Amino acid sequence: MSRGTYRELAATVLERPARLGAVRLVGVDGRAGSGKTTFAGRLARELGRTRRVTVLHTDDLLDGWAKLLAWQPRMREWVFEPLRRGGAGAYRRYDWEAQRLVDEWTPVEPPDFLVVEGVGSASAAVRADLTLGVLVTAPRELRLRRGLERDGEALRGEWERWMAGEDGHFAEDRTAEFVDVLVDAAPVEAHDAEIEYIIGPGGLSARATLGDDPMSGPDGEEQSDEH
């Protein structure tokens, strides 16, 4: 295992070309509860030191627990294509309590960097637009525990169905073979999690095929991810 820093990764993003019009798009992919929200936030903090950065969560464009990738056509129509043309995007956020999209539109002004985190954010449907693709991994037991601690035991069935869907998606998409960075979000190696991350098998140009996330030990970072 080796370490990377968010500052170095931000510099890598800046060095690479924009592929979504003038916007550099970063996809932070991974299964629910893996820690991708935390990773995306820390990377965005570094990117935002010098440029304009926007973070979008795919959970905000879903249809509840129904489909893993329901967000993709909405994100493309409402956000990606307007940004590609140099204009502003907008989206309607999904209200998980009301179980519907809200009526109000949230504007997305053209940023220098757009960080999208969520299941499928570095998948084949998005890949051509990515400046950088990241896959965040963690063991199944840890991911499920994080989810149930956040959402409650009553949603165990939803979580288990969602996780089964993730298994099918990642096996078919082979995301781990195509991302630029594979991250172990539950490493045994000690590190300063605020500024560093542990690079998983495959290094900075991951080409490993993962049926499920590799087993490793939790390092104490128990921050929950979105669905």
Image (cartoon, helix red, strand yellow):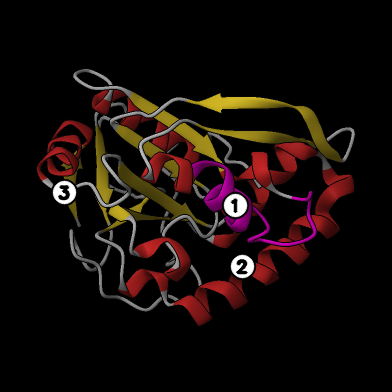
> Is there CB contact under 8 Å for labels 2 and 1?
yes
Q: Find out whether residue 78 is within the magenta segment.
A: yes
Compared with 153, 124 (above or below) is below
Residue at 66% from the left image edge and 38% from the top image edge: 60
Image location (x, y in percent) of residue 30 = 48, 56
Compared with 61, 221 (above or below) is above
Q: Is mark 2 on a helix, strand or loop?
A: helix
* Residue 169 in the figure: left or right of residue 205: right
Image location (x, y in percent) of residue 89 = 51, 34
Q: Mark 3 points at which residue?
A: 17
Q: Find out whether residue 69 is within the magenta segment.
A: yes
Identity of the amino acid at label 2?
Glu
Q: Residue furthest left?
A: 15
Q: What stretch is highlighted in magenta?
A: 63-79
Residue at 37% from the left image edge and 45% from the top image edge: 84
Residue at 77% from the left image edge and 66% from the top image edge: 161
Q: Mark 1 points at which residue?
A: 32
Q: Mark 2 points at which residue?
A: 166
Residue at 58% from the left image edge and 37% from the top image edge: 224
Task: Determine which quarter of the picture holds residue 48.
Answer: top left
Which badge, 2 or 3, is on the more N-terminal residue? 3
* Residue 30 in the figure: left or right of residue 153: left
Disc 3/disc 1 C-alpha distance (Å)? 29 Å
